[in-house]
Amino acid sequence: MSTLGTIKNFTSAGAIAPYRIVAAGASDGIVKQATAATDKLLGCTGVGRVDAADKRIDVCLDNVQKIEFGGDVAFGDPLTSDAQGRAIKAEPAAGANVRVVGNALESGSLGVIGDVHIVPSTLQG
């Protein structure tokens, strides 16, 4: 079950789909749909969406939220972003860092919209 938590409104750098991971954009107050595990992950969109740049969008910054999975995810896995802003297991290579948006609160596979505890952090391999 999703809960409201902290929600902040930002300006989009481009299209952002529902239930996707959101990352910091190029300047203050601008966000984008995450496209890589190295993006500065902030939270997720929930049911919100925008179809173009310079639109306003609410971003869920904490608590338990719904995010679409981009592959197999197990309960408790740390999650990062794939190229489409979907949640995948964070698995950094040795000596590399990946950004984590939070931890899976259920198992799922590609296309499942699952519960994630939003706790942005960095994981080092």
Image (spheres, helix red, strand yellow):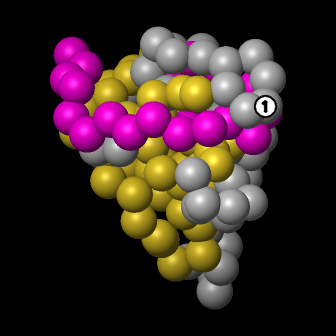
Q: Is residue 107 left or right of residue 69?
A: left
Q: Which residues are magenta?
A: 1-21
Q: Residue furthest bottom?
A: 95
Task: Report the residue at 63% width, 86% height from top.
Answer: 95
**In this figure, which residue is indicated by the disc labeled 1?**
53
Position of residue 29 relative to residue 93, above or below, is: above
In the rendering, at what x and y percent does residue 61 appear?
35, 44
Queried whether the magenta region covers residue 16, the answer comes back as yes
Residue 84, position as x, y percentages in the image = 74, 32
Q: Within 10 Å of the Cα at label 1, are there few (<14), some (14-19), or many (20+) other Cα atoms?
A: some
Q: Which residue is pictured at 48% across the width and 57% down the height?
A: 100
Q: Give the quadrant of the N terminus.
A: top left
Left or right: residue 10 compared with residue 8: right
Q: Position of residue 47 (x, y in %)?
A: 47, 13
| Majority secondary structure of magenta residues | loop
Residue 74 visible here = no
Amino acid on which disc 1 is placed: Ala
Q: Is residue 23 above or below residue 4?
A: below
In what element is the residue under mark 1?
loop
88 left or right of 104 in image: right
**Is residue 119 visible from the viewing direction of this image?**
yes
Who is closer to the viewer here, 121 or 4?
4
Which of the 4 image quadrants contains residue 105? top left
Q: Where residue 11 sits: x, y (%)?
A: 62, 38
Looking at the rendered structure, the number of numbered marks drawn on it comes to 1
Give the position of the C terminus as an image quadrant.
bottom right
Name the residue rendered at 20%, 23% in the picture.
3
Q: Quadrant of residue 106?
A: top left
Comparing 55 with 76, the one in front is: 55
Q: Specify whether residue 39 is painted magenta.
A: no
Name the residue located 75 percent from the left edge and 40 percent from the top edge: 13
